[in-house]
Image (cartoon, helix red, strand yellow):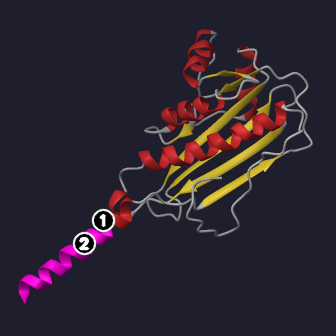
């Protein structure tokens, strides 16, 4: 009898582990886009190093810029190259992230027409322990063209292992902004913009 109880407990534990190993769905996803904006002569866009969680902010910004390089319309300056070039020109990188004013100044030093700013957050006690927020700014006017916030949950056994979820959130943001850049560059003849998740959605899929 005792052996059977132990076997059942072991099988139940395996089922819990299997459930925790599956990839989670998006818990927060909001994409706001100024569809009336028409870039006059965008050619180059810079992705600045993200702010926020030190452990993940640089890799997240590089993952994000990797997605943007898949489109042929705009030249993308990666975060690493941006930091090297801007530092060489005497501008310091703020520890707490860029203000829009500082981001525009950095982009001007790189002769870029638009700039991405991002932030990575990790909080253990939250519905979305991993959250990434990104803005696209027009350098000339300072206008906020698009904002994106995406969050993923983390399972109880993986509280200290956020890397997979940071990458999932970055991948989602990268795919969404890739569509947005295609939309801007194609003269709005196509309509590929992603949709937001409904409020309090527990949608299981992380595809858009």
Residue pointed to by mark 1: 17
Q: Is residue 123 left or right of residue 175?
A: left
Instruction: Give, as a single range, the part of the protein colored magenta.
Output: 1-17
Q: Secondary structure at mark 2?
A: helix
Q: Secondary structure at mark 1?
A: helix
Q: CA distance from mark 2 to mark 1?
A: 6 Å
Residue 153, placed above or below residue 56 = below
Residue 8 falls within the magenta-colored stretch: yes
Residue occupying image coordinates x 88% and y 21%:
41
- Residue at the outermost left position: 2
Camera-side residue: 109 or 132?
132
Residue 46, placed above or below residue 147 = above
Cβ–Cβ below 8 Å for labels 2 and 1? yes
Residue occupying image coordinates x 58% and y 14%:
87
Asked which quadrant contains residue 107, the reply is top right
Camera-side residue: 83 or 61?
61
Residue pointed to by mark 2: 13
């Amino acid at each position: 009898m005792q052996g059977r109880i132990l076997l059942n407990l072991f099988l139940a534990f395996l089922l819990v582990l299997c459930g925790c190993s599956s990839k989670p769905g998006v818990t927060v996803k909001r994409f706001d886009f100024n569809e009336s904006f028409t870039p006059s002569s965008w050619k180059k866009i810079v992705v600045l190093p993200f702010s926020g969680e030190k452990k993940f902010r640089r890799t997240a910004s590089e993952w994000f810029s990797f997605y943007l390089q898949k489109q042929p319309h705009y030249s993308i300056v990666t975060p690493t190259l941006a930091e090297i070039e801007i530092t060489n020109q005497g501008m310091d990188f703020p520890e707490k992230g860029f203000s829009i004013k500082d981001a525009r100044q950095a982009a001007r030093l790189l002769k870029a027409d638009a700039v991405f700013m991002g932030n990575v957050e990790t909080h253990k006690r939250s519905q979305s322990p991993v959250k990434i927020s990104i803005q696209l700014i027009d350098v000339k006017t300072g206008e906020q063209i698009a904002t994106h916030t995406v969050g993923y949950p983390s399972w109880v056994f993986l509280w200290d292992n956020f890397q997979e979820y940071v990458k999932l959130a970055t991948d989602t943001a990268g795919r969404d902004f890739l569509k947005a850049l295609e939309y801007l560059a194609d003269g709005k003849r196509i309509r590929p913009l992603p949709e937001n998740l409904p409020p309090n959605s527990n949608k299981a899929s992380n595809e858009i």
